[in-house]
Amino acid sequence: MPNQIKIFKKINSYNKSINVSSDKSLSIRAVLLASQAVGVSTISNILESEDVLNAIKSIKKLGIECKKIGNQYKILGYGLNSFDIKKKTTIYAGNSGTFARLILGLLVRTKKIVKLTGDKSLSKRDFSRITEPLKEFGVNIKSKNNSLPIEILGSEFLKPINYSETRGSAQCKSAVMLAALNTPGITKIKAVSSRDHTEKMFEHLKIPIKIESKKKFDLIEVQGLNQFDAFDYIVPGDISSSAFFIVLTILSNNSKIRIKNVNINKSRIGIITILKKMNCKIRFYNTKIYKGEKTADIIVESSRNIKGINCPVYLNSAAIDEFLVIFLIAAKAKGVSNFKNLGELNTKESPRLNISVSFLKMLGVRVDRNKNDIKIYGNPNLKISKTLHMKNYLKDHRVFMMSCIAALSFIENGEVIIEDKDSINTSFPSFLKILKKLGAVIK
């Protein structure tokens, strides 16, 4: 079958409740921390996407016993640095930057060389931002051009470091925190505020950690060489997956959706803050705290009178994976929207800032760009009345899903052909199934 879909009809109005895929960031972190805990951890509702399944396959290859029973994964850990690594071990991260960077943090004491590889897209991404601090711990790392494949050989003489993270990368911060687990003494981190899932899991597992939040950054201290017990964890829904349905509903006529049990950690809901500032109808219901993470049902309604925004830069990190669809809202808004300092988008699975600008122009939207700043001139009457063909974007799952949302929201008398359907398997295998449940016609 061809790896493409065709959309030729705008979605009809709907009023539905859905569950989206489980949170990928939490799924990967839970798997990795369970591999280092003492005893059997039970993780339920894991996202069974390619990224997470590659993480599970990898810890098995590193000697960790992991069994699936029903909707639960049972992971038996023997504590810190308990991987049983054989000679010439190669682990494959697929498309997952999160897993690739975090697993390096757990391999800082390996006595045998481990080779880390990834797919074509991940192999183009820069890993120097994590390999450099790991070298400071005393780890031996080899790579060409600061990218995958990487060979890592740990050290028995690790020393704690003082690390400054200036880009707002939760992956890099988390990798250093995981390296600190196996390092004697106190590792100190000064980090621009970003996703704090790892910090919350450390706190829940009673791993010694101190966190002091300043206005523009966090100060984190991790005390190393402290074992922690196995745990039970139920993974909530993913806000990044929810974003596509939030935006589709806002842009559709007379529609309403309830997305159940979604992680609304404050470091992840930049999209909600931004869209509310743009006059979109979004609210939380049934809010709870689950093991440090806030969850809720997200209720969204079609929104008229969407207005442009001067997007505050401090929200960039909390919305970094959602800007592709935020730009679609800006394209339909009244007035001009300004977004600044978005260079981090080009370090993702594909150069997403470049792609977004090209895609919006393809739709007929005026976009001005100055390096990493863009200005989008909204058009409330935006329509697709021709054939568009989305292809050749390094199989980026979010580009594929963004293209689907744009087609279902704007199409009138045209047709949108979207390549790389299989890319959604990395993060959201049920995406098209849920769209069809809402009434989308997809060939």
Image (cartoon, rainbow, N blue to C red):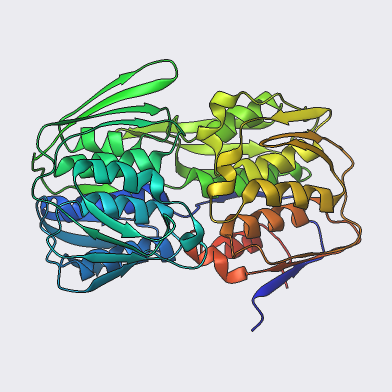
Q: Is residue 291 visible?
A: no
Q: Position of residue 286 (x, y in %)?
A: 45, 33
Give the position of the N terminus as an image quadrant.
Answer: bottom right
Nearest the eye: 192 or 145: 145
Q: Residue at x 31, y 50 (%)?
A: 102
Q: Position of residue 392 (x, y in %)?
A: 68, 66
Q: Residue at x 33, y 44 (%)?
A: 132
Give the position of the C terminus as an image quadrant.
Answer: bottom right
Q: Give the left or right position of residue 213, taking residue 418 as reference.
A: left
Q: Position of residue 34 (x, y in %)?
A: 20, 52
Q: Give the left or right position of residue 378, taking residue 118 as reference.
A: right
All told, the count of numbered labels is 0
Q: Is residue 427 visible?
A: yes
Q: Give the left or right position of residue 293, taking residue 16 as reference.
A: left
Q: Residue at x 79, y 40 (%)?
A: 331
Q: Which image quarter: residue 91?
A: bottom left
Nearest the eye: 340 or 127: 127
